[in-house]
């Protein structure tokens, strides 16, 4: 007797387990609020720090050195912000929406670096993002690379010669240690240099 196709396909579909998330906060109310957001979303379960895939840390609370961390910071923080951890980590505003928090946790669990655009606006030196040795012009070129522009298109958009555009692309590939334009864009997204 044959098993119906729908049943056999369902049996072969791997079951995805929820992402285990620990919350470290100095204030019980903040911890409860973060847990509530995560527990209300079926993609996450909250656990103790030692069993976590990702740790959400409020402010400057300590996090395990080897943890994938989503750090929440207030807009009133003075001085340099802690850099997102590599190879994956996040730095988002304490005022971020529930959707932004869950997106950051998902991104970090997927191996990405996530930086809240509001915090990024404070400057790469304050965020300490990898790749901060790219010049502002190279960042413009990188954004155009992400749009799929060829050297001629980059040159036209920036009002420079095609040779200059090619020079900038080569410099970006070198600084990101990328073997191709596609790899450069992929690495830039993973390092938080480009938004998703």
Image: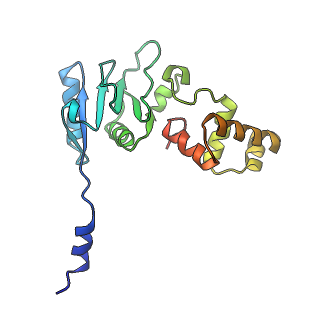
Residue pictured at 29% horizontal, 30% vertical = 56
Return the residue nearer the eye: 140 or 131.
131
Q: Residue furthest top?
A: 78
- On the image, the x and y values in percent for residue 88 come to 41, 35
Q: How many marks?
A: 0
Query: Viewed as shown, does residue 10 lie left or right of 165?
Result: left
Is 27 situated above or below 139? above
- On the image, the x and y values in percent for residue 83 come to 45, 24
Please indicate, yes or no, whether residue 94 appears anywhere in the rendered image: no
Is 135 situated above or below 165? above
Q: Quadrant of residue 59?
A: top left
Is 97 situated above or below 10? above
Return the residue nearer the eye: 103 or 86.
86
Residue pictured at 52% horizontal, 41% vertical = 189
Please indicate, yes or no, whether residue 177 appears anywhere in the rendered image: yes
Q: Quadrant of residue 166?
A: top right
Report the colour scheme.
rainbow
Q: Quadrant of the N terminus?
A: bottom left
Return the residue nearer the eye: 140 or 22.
22
Query: Viewed as shown, does residue 37 lie left or right of 181?
Result: left
Q: Quadrant of residue 188?
A: top right
- On the image, the x and y values in percent for residue 177 come to 60, 38
- On the image, the x and y values in percent for residue 89 come to 40, 33
């Amino acid at each position: 007797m044959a098993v119906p196709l729908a049943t056999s396909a369902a049996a072969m579909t791997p079951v995805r387990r929820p992402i285990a998330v620990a919350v470290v906060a100095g204030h019980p109310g903040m911890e409860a609020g973060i847990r509530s957001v995560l527990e209300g979303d079926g993609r996450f379960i909250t656990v103790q720090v030692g069993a976590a895939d990702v740790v959400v840390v409020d402010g400057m609370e300590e996090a395990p050195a080897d943890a994938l961390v989503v750090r929440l910071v207030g807009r009133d923080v003075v001085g340099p912000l802690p850099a997102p951890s590599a190879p994956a980590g996040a730095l988002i505003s304490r005022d971020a929406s529930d959707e932004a928090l869950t997106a950051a946790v998902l991104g970090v669990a997927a191996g990405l670096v996530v930086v809240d655009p509001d915090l990024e606006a404070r400057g790469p030196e304050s965020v300490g993002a990898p790749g901060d040795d790219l010049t502002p012009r190279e960042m413009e070129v990188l954004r155009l690379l992400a749009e799929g522009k060829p050297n001629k298109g980059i040159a036209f958009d920036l009002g420079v010669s095609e040779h200059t555009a090619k020079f900038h692309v080569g410099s970006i590939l070198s600084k990101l240690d990328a073997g191709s334009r596609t790899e450069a864009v992929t690495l830039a997204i993973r390092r938080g240099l480009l938004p998703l």
